Amino acid sequence: MSASREKKQRQGDLAQGLTQKQRQELKEQQAAKRKAVLYTVIGVVIAVLVVILLVWHSGIFQRRATALSVGGRDYSVTDVDYYFYSAMQTEYYYASMFGLATFDPSADLHTQYVDEEETQSYYDYFMEQATTQLTEAAALENAAAEEGYTLTDEDKAAVEEEISSLKTSAEQNGYPNFETFLKNNYGKYMTASAFKTCVERAKLVSSYKTAYSDKQEVTTEDLEAYYEENAATLDSYDYRYILVDGSVPTTTDEEGNTVEPTEEETAAAMQAAEVKANEFADAVKAAEDKSAAFGELAPEYVSEASKDSYAEDPDRSLYEGTVGSNLNSTFGSWLQEDGRTAGDVGVVEASSGYYVVLFLDRYRNEDPTADIRHILIKAETAEEDDPATEDVDESTVPTQEALDAAKAEAEKLMAEWEAGDKTAESFGELANANSDDPGSNTNGGLYENVYEGEFTIFDSWLFGESHQPGDVTLIENTNSGQQGWCVVYYQNENVPVWQTTADSSIRSQRVTDWMDSLTEGLEAVQGSGAKYVGA
């Protein structure tokens, strides 16, 4: 007989010798034991479910899910959200500033549409932007890895600076912590560590593209050939222009509602503007000195709000040295037409009136550019709750005392440099350690190929007199938000303006062609995590 059967036999024999009451008690004990085991199992299951729910609501599963696969790389929900919300923020900026979009970021993006025909929702549009960005990122990450290209120390410093700046912004805007700021701006699954990964990836691919562009060899023959094909956009233009306003202002009814002008009112205003523009053009054509006449007569034809400023400055309508690629898109083609001669006057229709344009000159700008270094010392601004400055925007307007302190600091740095070996390298070290300019305080304060008009506060010193490499000066920075003092170092003269534009265009086209070759054949496939993007 087996052991188990013997055990059962013994239990049976024992049960035969029990009273009815003992049998009932034994039965109840066995039932209680089974219940205890059952409740223990149930308790364990419930505890496990609670943990799973807590983990689920924490977003760990969702944020780590693969939302997009491309180029052999899997991108998580937070990876895609980084680009999704960046595209959304850009669209919202233009919507707010220029009224170019009409979506509500707080409402369901699936039911808001980019076009009137409702063929693409804003959700799909932002997802498309994110997919394009990550397709390029995957291609560049793969190419960089194959080449052994990694983030430089400067790149790493730039990443830390960007994150530090965002943390400061979050604090200034009242966010309780950085995590809350990230979730509010980059989706509820974003974390600080995931965000840093995204910023590092963005910096890597950007730096790698720049490195590819920098190592391109552009010869003089390349530049001349490009000029022959693109002279209109590379040449510089001198001209005058004003806009004769043909818009109709909105009105308000008795109930305070905005009333838009009718089509008839708009058409009548445009017609009147055309007549007025032609009258002005005829007056300029009849003048012996057309440029002077344009400046003198302009106040009579511009909008009421602009009359005084044009009257005070007859040259407000004058533009000199504008590169063709930067011309106004509405009347630029008129200026670029073959055969255009000095003194030509044109009337060009715009959406809100008519431009009157006077062509003065077109030429290939051979003026040299300059390589400079600079150190910006920003003047400190007052605290926002300072009662002594309640009538001004304290966040952007420094006191004279603060400006004087900034100047003293700039003078101290210039004296420190002059007391040393007075080299570009030593100036660069001072710039990296002290400059408040985020655009150059990681590369020695260097700006290359600076042309007249690019940094207007430097123009009179840079281009108003001749310089030798190593010349330095102090210049006050009066730009809003950047008020302070600059130590400026003249490094050397560089290529002419037109060559700078041509060189940039050639490199840009080569980078575009290279990117096309890297992304050719790459297919982006959405994963299970795609449904959490933009949540």
Image: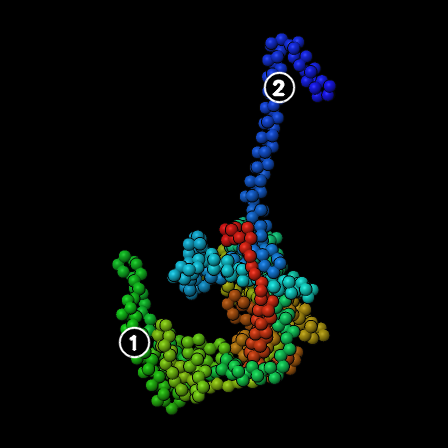
In the image, which disc is placed on residue 22?
none
Q: On the rendered structure, is 172 left or right of 493? A: left
In the image, which disc is placed on residue 271?
1
Q: Position of residue 121 (x, y in %)?
A: 44, 57
Against 21, residue 363 (above or below) is: below
Q: Position of residue 153 (x, y in %)?
A: 68, 63
Q: Nearer the viewer, residue 402 or 44?
A: 44
CA–CA distance in space, label 2 to label 1 = 101 Å
Q: Position of residue 213 (x, y in %)?
A: 62, 72
Q: Nearer the viewer, residue 270 or 169?
A: 270
Q: On the rendered structure, is 320 left or right of 13? A: left
Rendering quarter of residue 253: bottom left
Q: Residues within 10 Å of mark 1 (few under 14, many from 20)?
A: some
SS type, badge 2: helix
Q: Residue at x 40, y 76 (%)?
A: 309
Q: Residue at x 47, y 60 (%)?
A: 125
SS type, badge 1: helix
Residue on which disc 2 sits = 30
Q: Residue at x 55, y 78 (%)?
A: 501
Kind of residue at disc 1: Gln
Q: On the rendered structure, is 56 left or right of 245? A: right
Against 248, residue 337 (above or below) is: below
Q: Position of residue 396 (x, y in %)?
A: 50, 63
Against 175, residue 402 (above or below) is: below
